[in-house]
Amino acid sequence: MIHAQDDINIDERHPSPKRLRRLRVLFWDSAGTLFLAIGLVGVVLPILPTTPFLLLAAACYLKGSKRMHTWMTNNRWFGQYLRDYMEGKGIPRRTKVVSLSALWLVIVLSAVFATESLVIRVVLLIVAIGVTVHVTTIKTKPTKS
């Protein structure tokens, strides 16, 4: 008995290099878009860190879409921030203060008013401490005088 698969050329069973490249680009672009979306949610939700997700998005776009990577690093809202972070130049003191103030305000308000669960309060505290440690250990970018 002859099966339909027996007649398939082995080259047809394996994707072409061009198709593999398109799949890789699609994967990296999709991952970049997902991380970008999570990072942008983190802008308004202080318990979700923004920087790691924006950096992940930029790294994914670097492997996928050079156009999207360029867009991210030249974006008027977070492009300079990303470039400075990736180049090891640091974060301005004002950005650190505003970020940590917003983080702790939201964490405290959430722990006091949004939950009665001790476990959730402990998790919120751990997240706040982790983000605080991360932000304070990043080099402080000198301000222009």
Image (cartoon, rainbow, N blue to C red):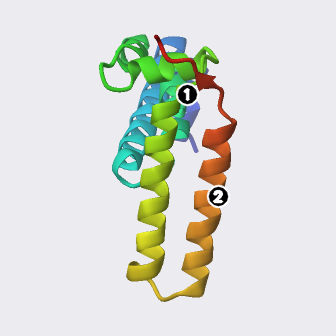
The answer to whether mark 1 and mark 2 are in CB contact below 8 A is no
Image x and y of residue 64, in percent: 47, 20
How many numbered tags mark residues here? 2
For this orientation, the residue located farthest to the front is 145
Residue 114, compared with residue 73, is above or below; it is: below
Q: Amino acid at mark 1?
A: Arg
Image x and y of residue 108, in percent: 47, 70
Q: Residue at x 62, y 75 (%)?
A: 122
Label 2 secondary element:
helix
Residue at which label 1 appears = 13
Q: Is residue 128 visible?
A: yes
Q: Is residue 9 visible?
A: no
Q: Amino acid at mark 2?
A: Ile
In-front residue for pair 117/11: 117
Q: Residue at x 60, y 60 (%)?
A: 127
For this orientation, the residue located farthest to the bottom is 116
Q: Residue at x 51, y 49 (%)?
A: 100
